[in-house]
Amino acid sequence: MEKLLEERWFTETPDGLCLVGTRCMACEKVFFPRKEVCPDCYEGVLVDVPLSKRGKLHAFTLSVMGPPHLDKPYVAAFVDLPEGIKVYTLLTDCEPVKEVVRVGMDVEMVIERIMEDEAGNEVLGYKFRPSRTEKAS
């Protein structure tokens, strides 16, 4: 059986699951994960907005140590989304890292296994991978 790591982080669109954030109606800033009150202007009128599945790699690191539930080594990263926010993520499909991954590259979101829970269920979450256009170049 599969389940999402955090169901409230996602929304269903015609193109499948995508991350969902909130946009402040007063200052127009977008946040992820969702907020109840704008942390920038403190207004309380926020609306849900689906976030882009594509972005640019802002920064990354290869980690050989970390939480016991993550397969090691893994690549942790920040991705800039067109909505003006950075999301923390794991990268996937990027071996060999030193040859494939570079700051500024185009990446796309995928839903993949993050870990297995104590009952043996696969827990899915979002990751980013080099976009198909990056792989072709």
Image: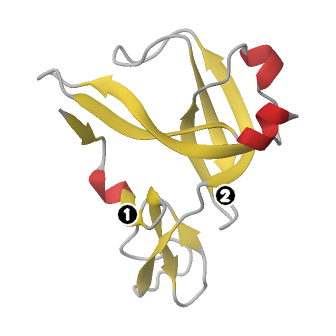
**Residue 79 % position (x, y):** 66, 46
Q: Answer few, some or many: residues within 10 Å of disc 2's Cα (few below 14, many 20 plus, some between 14 and 19).
A: some
The type of residue carrying mark 1 is Thr
Marks 1 and 2: which is nearer the front?
1
The image shows residue 109, relative to residue 53, as above or below, that is above
Q: CA distance from mark 1 to mark 2?
A: 16 Å
Residue 24 falls left or right of residue 27: left
| Disc number for residue 11 | 1
Question: Residue at image x 24%, y 40%?
Answer: 3
**Residue 100 % position (x, y):** 78, 23
Instruction: Write down the residue under mark 2.
Output: 81
Q: Secondary structure at mark 2?
A: loop
Question: Residue at image x 52%, y 78%?
Answer: 23
Residue 22 falls left or right of residue 103: left
The type of residue carrying mark 2 is Leu
Q: Nearer the viewer, residue 85 or 51?
A: 51
**Residue 33 % position (x, y):** 44, 59
Question: Residue at image x 44%, y 14%?
Answer: 71
Could you tell me how many numbered marks the image carries? 2
The image shows residue 45, relative to residue 111, as above or below, that is below
Kindly indicate the quadrant of the structure image that contains residue 84: bottom right
Query: Mark 2 or mark 1, which is nearer the start of the sequence?
Result: 1
